[in-house]
Amino acid sequence: MTNSREWLMQWLRDAHAMEEQAETMLKSQYDRLESYPGLRQRIGQHIEETKEQAKRLEQCLDRIGGGTSTMKDAGAKLMATAQGLSGIFAGDEVMKGSLASYTFEHMEIASYTMLIAAAEKCGEPEIQRACEQNLREEQEMASWLEKNLPAVTQQFMARDEKDADTAKR
C-alpha cells in the first residue's frame, strides 16, 4: 500500500468516528428540542443522513481493505455524550447546541473536501463519489442552520422573556 492510500484509509476512519460523534451529539439535542419543532425536524432528518454517511464510509473502508477504528469511534461517542450532558445544565442549551452543530458541520465539510481530493489522488472514484454525497448533505445542513439560526435565536429569546414574565407573577 502506498503512503497516500494509508492516509486515505486513516482519514476515512477519522471521518467515520466523526459521524459516530455527530450521531450521538444530534440525538442528544433532538431529545430536548420539543419547543423548537422546525429545528427538531431538521435535526431528526440529519440524524438519518448521518447514519447513511457512516455506512458509506464503512463501505469505502471495506473497499480498500480497512475497517473502522473501534477506539476512535468509542472516543468520539464519549466526547459527544459528555458534550450533551454538559448542555443540560446550560440555560441556553438550544443556542449552545446550535452553535456546536454549525461549527461541527463545517469541520465535516472540511473533512470531506480533503477526502475527495485524497480519493481522486488515489484513483478511487467510488470513494470520491461517496464522500461527495456526504459533503453535499453536510453543506445542506450547514446552510439550513445558517439560514435558521436567526429565527431560532429570536424564538429562544422570546421564550426566555415569556418565562421571565411568568416568574415575576
Image (cartoon, helix red, strand yellow):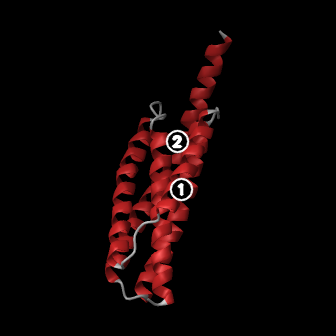
Mark nearer the viewer, 1 or 2:
1
Residue, far right = 168
Rendered residue at 54%/45% (across/down)? 81
Which quarter of the figure has residue 163? top right
Rendered residue at 45%/56% (across/down)? 20
Callout 1 environment at 10 Å: few (<14), some (14 to 19), or many (20+)? many
Is residue 143 visible in the rendered structure shown here? no
- The residue that disc 2 covers is 151
Q: Which type of secondary structure does the marked residue at label 1 adopt? A: helix
The amino acid type, in three-letter code, at marker 2 is: Ala
- State the separation of the CA atoms marked 1 and 2: 30 Å
Q: Position of residue 119 (x, y in %)?
A: 41, 82
Q: Nearer the viewer, residue 157 or 105?
A: 105
Query: Is 52 placed left or right of 94 in the picture?
Result: left
Query: Can you say whether 127 is above or below 81 in the image?
Result: below
Residue, far top = 169
Q: Nearer the viewer, residue 125 or 61?
A: 61
Q: Nearer the viewer, residue 70 or 160?
A: 70
Q: Quadrant of the N terminus?
A: bottom left
Q: Position of residue 85 (x, y in %)?
A: 58, 38
Rendered residue at 38%/67% (across/down)? 57
Q: Nearer the viewer, residue 17 or 129?
A: 17
- The residue that disc 1 covers is 76
Is residue 25 visible in the rendered structure shown here? yes
> Mark 1 and 2 residues: CB-CB less than 8 Å, in contact?
no
Query: Is 59 placed left or right of 30 in the picture?
Result: left
First-in-chain label (1 vs 2): 1
Rendered residue at 42%/59% (across/down)? 140
Q: Which mark is on residue 99?
A: none
The amino acid type, in three-letter code, at marker 1 is: Ala
Q: Position of residue 133 (x, y in %)?
A: 35, 68
Query: Can you say whether 118 is above or below 57 in the image?
Result: below
